[in-house]
């Protein structure tokens, strides 16, 4: 044990340790606990694509963790760091995540060992289409069996290519566009999917601040307004979380940490302005509305109210956990805190909102997109104008009979029926609020669990065990 304390655990080991801690509080048989934990299957594919006059061989993975509910769901990432252990750990988190937010999917994850910047768009398309073919012929991409989504290094563009390739291979399948989520809206995607994970982080924090006892545990006061936040990683998730929290909730983003260094401003960073600066191809160090610092492990250790790690796994580990000065951490990335670091942070009184819950916004809205594709109709199409007509009638009646006068802005907002983006955000908000309350209620009833992460794992282990028992396993 003493030797173990001197080293940290890798991503997969961390997930297994956190799972095991929660499982120890259940009365489920050890054999079933093991069945729920292990990855059902992992497929490794090595395929060649002729590019630049020669054949290049690529290695890809698709892990299926649990099929207690189908289809299974999980993103596909493009990175040179992709490996079997990583995709299996991520697939396990997807199983637990979907169970936690009551989305009817099992867990899966995929990856391709590739650095997207090494290839131009046409080459990436050819690689992606061939990878899709390799997955599709083994039913590892299919609307009723396995539904990928974007992840690190992929986005709407890659999902469009994958969907189109699957559609060509399965042109008689009426639900073929539901084979992936995270597509562009004009190709069957859904409004609000790109922002979903970051928006989910915002809704999770809003729900946290509705509970005075949790605010007190985190040694905080009041609301999100004015809270000092550090963002580690300004990719899709970090950018949207920072943007919404600063623009809509009044939080101050005092530091943004990126690979090329960090920008700090105690008065608050204009996230949209910074993002545009980077989008224009300008280096971080040339951004004038803050203080630049060269890349340093110490940047994540600076004092703040809320730390949001939104990049990769393991950034908070046994080496720096005891130096973290944030009052609370919300895990926007998958596995940013290792198991050993989690123990250190809890001992130091740092309040943690775990990835299992905090970054579930993406899969939640992916579920809405999948339902939209299976139903072959966009949300709001049937009822929006009916709602608008009813609301207009009510406003007109109150104005005519009682002489009431309504503010023009209020009247317009009240009368207008809900569009797809309104329904998506409302559904996501409800999902995040309900899940937080469920985790908190379990923790209140079983205080020996100790923290939200263990409570979340405890919840999903019991949920999945019930599924397996119900189908006779």
Image (cartoon, helix red, strand yellow):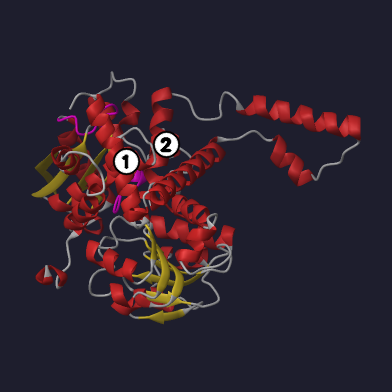
Regarding residue 352, the answer to whether it shows in the image is yes
**Circle number at residue 159:** 1
Q: Is residue 244 above or below residue 465?
A: below
Residue 37 lies in the magenta stretch: no
Q: Quadrant of residue 323?
A: bottom left
Regarding residue 158, the answer to whether it shows in the image is no
Instruction: Answer with left or right where residue 29 lies relative to residue 353.
Output: left
Which residue: 34% across, 32% down?
A: 104
**Circle number at residue 393:** none
Residue 186 drawn at (x, y percent): 44, 35
Which residue: 42% across, 66% down?
A: 328
Q: Is residue 258 above or below residue 285?
A: above
The residue range painted magenta reads 138-158
Closer to us: 338 or 468: 468
Residue 224 drawn at (x, y percent): 55, 62
Closer to us: 53 or 269: 269
For the residues labelled 1 and 2, the Cα–Cα distance comes to 10 Å
Residue 429 drawn at (x, y percent): 51, 44
Residue marked by disc 2: 189
Q: Is residue 406 above or below residue 376?
A: below
Residue 109 drawn at (x, y percent): 23, 44
At mark 1, the secondary structure is: helix
- The reply to whether the C-beta atoms of the residues labelled 1 and 2 are less than 8 Å apart is yes
Which residue: 21% across, 36% down?
A: 66
């Amino acid at each position: 044990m003493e030797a173990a304390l001197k080293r940290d655990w890798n991503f997969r080991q961390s997930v297994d340790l956190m799972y095991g801690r929660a499982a120890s509080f259940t009365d489920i048989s050890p054999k079933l606990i093991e069945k729920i934990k292990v990855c059902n299957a992992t497929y490794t594919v090595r395929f060649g694509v002729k590019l630049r006059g020669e054949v290049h061989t690529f290695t890809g993975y698709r892990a299926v963790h649990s099929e207690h509910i189908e289809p299974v769901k999980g993103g596909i990432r493009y990175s040179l760091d992709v490996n079997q252990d990583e995709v299996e750990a991520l697939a396990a988190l997807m199983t637990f995540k979907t169970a936690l937010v009551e989305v009817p999917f099992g867990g899966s994850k995929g990856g391709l060992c590739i650095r997207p910047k090494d290839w131009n768009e046409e080459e990436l398309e050819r690689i992606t289409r061939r990878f899709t073919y390799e997955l599709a012929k083994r039913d590892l991409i299919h609307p009723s069996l396995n539904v990928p989504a974007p992840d690190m290094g992929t986005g709407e563009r890659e999902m469009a290519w994958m969907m189109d390739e699957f559609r060509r291979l399965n042109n008689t399948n009426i639900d073929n566009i539901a084979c992936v989520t995270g597509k562009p809206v004009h190709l069957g995607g859904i409004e609000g999917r790109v922002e979903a994970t970051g928006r989910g982080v915002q809704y999770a924090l809003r729900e946290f601040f509705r509970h005075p006892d949790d605010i007190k545990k985190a040694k905080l006061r009041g609301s999100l307004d004015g809270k000092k936040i550090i963002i580690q990683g300004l990719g899709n998730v970090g950018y949207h979380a920072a943007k919404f929290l600063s623009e809509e909730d009044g939080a101050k983003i005092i530091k943004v940490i990126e690979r090329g260094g960090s920008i700090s401003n105690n008065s608050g960073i204009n996230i949209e302005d910074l993002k545009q600066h980077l989008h224009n191809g300008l280096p971080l160090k040339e951004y004038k509305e803050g203080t630049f610092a060269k890349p340093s492990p110490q940047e994540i250790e600076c004092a703040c109210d809320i730390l949001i790690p939104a990049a990769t796994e393991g950034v908070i580990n046994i080496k720096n956990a005891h130096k973290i000065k944030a009052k609370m951490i919300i895990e926007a990335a998958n596995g940013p805190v290792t198991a050993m670091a989690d123990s250190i942070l809890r001992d130091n009184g740092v309040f943690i909102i775990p990835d299992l819950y905090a970054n579930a916004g993406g899969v939640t809205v992916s579920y809405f997109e999948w339902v939209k594709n299976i139903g072959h109709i966009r949300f709001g199409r049937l009822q929006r104008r009916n709602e608008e007509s009813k609301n207009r009638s009510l406003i007109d009646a109150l104005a005519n009979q009682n002489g009431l006068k309504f503010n023009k802005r209020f009247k317009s907002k009240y009368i207008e029926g809900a569009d797809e983006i309104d329904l998506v955000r409302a559904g996501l908000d409800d999902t995040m609020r309900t899940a937080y309350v469920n985790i908190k209620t379990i923790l209140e009833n079983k205080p020996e669990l100790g923290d939200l992460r263990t409570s979340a794992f405890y919840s999903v282990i019991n949920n999945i065990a019930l599924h397996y028992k119900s189908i006779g396993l």
